[in-house]
């Protein structure tokens, strides 16, 4: 399979008077359908890199290609469309809208497109709620669910437009180990069944060990990019 994301010689420098270089000459290929973990110490540049991989942030220089489109050549509108249709985001704090129910939150990426919610779309949202195991609580307001349930809702929401890529920034950072396991099993099964490419930042070595590939960031550089031991046996 080909690469769904390619970045070349990416640098990121923050600040104009006092300059801090956060990413140094990063080149990476992300294979379509793969499950990737990004690990590294706090402040090493993981979130900065993930945001650039998802076109949420611009590099200072370097080249980014997502789903065969060169990001610097797209208009603002084309970029917004690419983001909404091709990439789903899951963050440590899920950012569900508290005044809406779980299923209304899941429908949000579709509604943003300004299209009418048809029976077919509603059926997809219901199917996703079932897939993440939340059929019983899907009409609860987002606030009236446990942290793990809210995070599973966020994953269903990220899947609503059937994106090719899901980027997750410590999606289980504030969950207990039981819920963490459930979320990763879910992400893995979506990866296997739907072929969705995952890139997830994690501090949890056990989770990283289950990925197809571990990308380690040290001081803004890719130090090591190895397949975990599991694959070797
Ligand atoms: N908007 C910004 N302006 C200036 N510096 C920033 C900005 N965002 C991040 N940084 C700096 O860039 C470095 C990398 O930050 P980043 O958030 O990518 O780290 P991280 O690896 O995700 O850390 P953590 O594990 O704590 O989330 C840090 O030193 C941070 O202070
Ligand atoms: Mg971070």
Image (cartoon, rainbow, N blue to C red):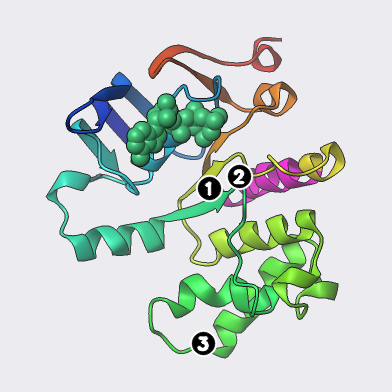
Please tell me whether residue 210 is drawn above or below residue 134 in the rendered image.
above
Residue 134: image quadrant is bottom right
- Mark 3 neighbour class, 10 Å CA radius: few under 14, some 14 to 19, many 20 or more: few
- Mark 2 neighbour class, 10 Å CA radius: few under 14, some 14 to 19, many 20 or more: some
First in sequence: mark 2 vs mark 1: 2
Q: Where is residue 69 shown, x and y percent of the image?
A: 23, 47
Q: What residue did someone put label 2 on?
A: 191
First in sequence: mark 1 vs mark 3: 3
Mark 3 and ligand 2: say if the CB distance to the nearest ligand atom is below 8 Å. Answer: no
Marks 1 and 3 in Cβ contact (< 8 Å): no
Q: Is residue 7 magenta?
A: no
Q: Nearer the viewer, residue 107 or 227?
A: 107
> Real-space Cα distance between discs 2 and 3?
26 Å
Q: What residue did someone put label 1 on?
A: 196
Task: Look at the image and tell me in which quarter the N terminus lies.
Answer: top left
16 sits left or right of 99 in the view: left
Marks 2 and 1 in Cβ contact (< 8 Å): yes
Dot label at residue 117: 3
Residue 203: image quadrant is top right
Q: Nearer the viewer, residue 8 or 97?
A: 97
Q: Which residues are magenta?
A: 182-194
Residue name at image x 39 percent, y 42 percent: 51
62 sits left or right of 147 in the view: left
84 sits left or right of 182 in the view: left
- Mark 1 neighbour class, 10 Å CA radius: few under 14, some 14 to 19, many 20 or more: many
Q: Secondary structure at mark 3?
A: loop
Count of marks, rendered view: 3
Q: Where is residue 98 shown, x and y percent of the image?
A: 65, 73
Task: Look at the image and tell me in which quarter the C terminus lies.
Answer: top right
Residue name at image x 44 percent, y 38 percent: 32
> Real-space Cα distance between discs 2 and 1?
5 Å
């Amino acid at each position: 399979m080909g690469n769904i994301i390619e970045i070349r010689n990416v640098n990121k420098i923050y600040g104009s008077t006092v300059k801090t270089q956060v990413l140094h000459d990063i080149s990476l290929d992300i294979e379509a359908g793969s499950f990737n973990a990004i690990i590294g110490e706090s402040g090493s540049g993981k979130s900065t890199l993930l945001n650039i991989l998802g076109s949420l942030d611009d590099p200072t220089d370097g080249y980014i290609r997502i789903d065969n489109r060169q990001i610097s050549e797209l208009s603002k509108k084309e970029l917004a469309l690419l983001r909404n249709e091709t990439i789903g985001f899951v963050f440590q704090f899920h950012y569900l809208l508290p005044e809406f129910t779980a299923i209304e939150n899941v429908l949000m990426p579709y509604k943003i497109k300004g299209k009418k919610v048809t029976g077919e779309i509603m059926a997809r949202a219901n199917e996703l709620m079932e897939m993440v195991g939340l059929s019983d609580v899907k009409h609860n307001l987002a606030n009236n669910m446990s942290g793990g349930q809210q995070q599973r809702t966020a994953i269903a929401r990220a899947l609503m437009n059937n994106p090719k890529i899901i980027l997750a920034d410590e999606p289980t950072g504030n969950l207990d180990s039981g819920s963490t396991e459930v979320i990763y099993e879910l992400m893995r099964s979506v990866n296997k069944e739907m072929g969705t490419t995952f890139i997830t930042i994690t501090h949890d070595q056990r989770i990283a060990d289950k990925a197809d590939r571990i990308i380690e960031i040290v001081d803004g550089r890719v130090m090591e990019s190895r397949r975990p031991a599991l694959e070797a046996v």
